[in-house]
Image (cartoon, rainbow, N blue to C red):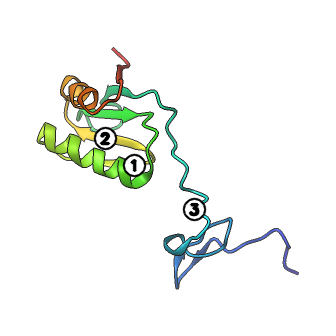
Amino acid sequence: MKSSSSSLVYSTDGGTMCPACRQPVKQCQCKANAAPKGDGVVRVSRQTKGRGGKTVTLVKGLALDADALAVLGKQLRTACGSGGTVKDGVIEVQGDHCDLIMKALASQGHQPKRVGG
């Protein structure tokens, strides 16, 4: 017997499925996952833990949607002249660029805070 609470999570035709409208995420009409994850307080920190001793600058708390966050991440990486990525609402820039990133964010109207020493 099938449970009435079970739902399709992944389909080989469309990939990951939206839990609300049960359409492929790329074709989702309800945009249930479109809410920004940030709380509005922009935190800039430096981290080396779990990265093989490599330093990474993290930017958390931006209340932007995924597309705007990707664009901002690209701008910050270009300003620092290094690589990086955007994962789960966090911008990661390779290297120790806290001061440079804080200046770039302040020039764009954000109010960044330095976190973690």
Q: How many marks?
A: 3
x, y percent for residue 31: 57, 62
User: Which residue corresponds to the image point at 52% horizontal and 75% vertical from the top-left?
Assistant: 27
Amino acid beneath label 3: Lys
Q: Nearer the viewer, residue 80 or 31?
A: 31
Q: Secondary structure at mark 2?
A: strand
Query: Cβ–Cβ below 8 Å for labels 3 and 2?
Result: no
x, y percent for residue 76: 22, 40
Amino acid beneath label 2: Glu
User: Which residue corresponds to the image point at 73% horizontal and 72% vertical from the top-left?
Assistant: 7
Residue 17 in the figure: left or right of residue 63:
right
Distance between the alpha carbons at the discs numbered 1 and 3 = 19 Å
Q: Quadrant of the N terminus?
A: bottom right
Circle 2 Cα neighbour tier, 10 Å, few/some/many (<14 / 14–19 / ≥20): many
Q: Secondary structure at mark 1?
A: strand
User: Which residue corresponds to the image point at 11% horizontal and 41% vertical from the top-left?
Assistant: 81
Q: Secondary structure at mark 3?
A: loop
Q: Nearer the viewer, residue 111 or 9?
A: 111
Q: Nearer the viewer, mark 1 or mark 3?
A: 3
User: Which residue corresponds to the image point at 36% horizontal and 20% vertical from the top-left?
Assistant: 113
Sequence-earlier tag: 3 or 2: 3
Q: Quadrant of the C terminus?
A: top left
x, y percent for residue 108: 27, 33
**Is 75 drawn above or below residue 45 in the view shown?**
below
**Residue most extreme to the bottom:** 13
**Mark seen at residue 31:** 3
Q: Nearer the viewer, mark 3 or mark 2?
A: 3
Q: Please give the residue where the numbered disc 2 appears in the rendered image.
A: 92
**Mark seen at residue 87:** 1
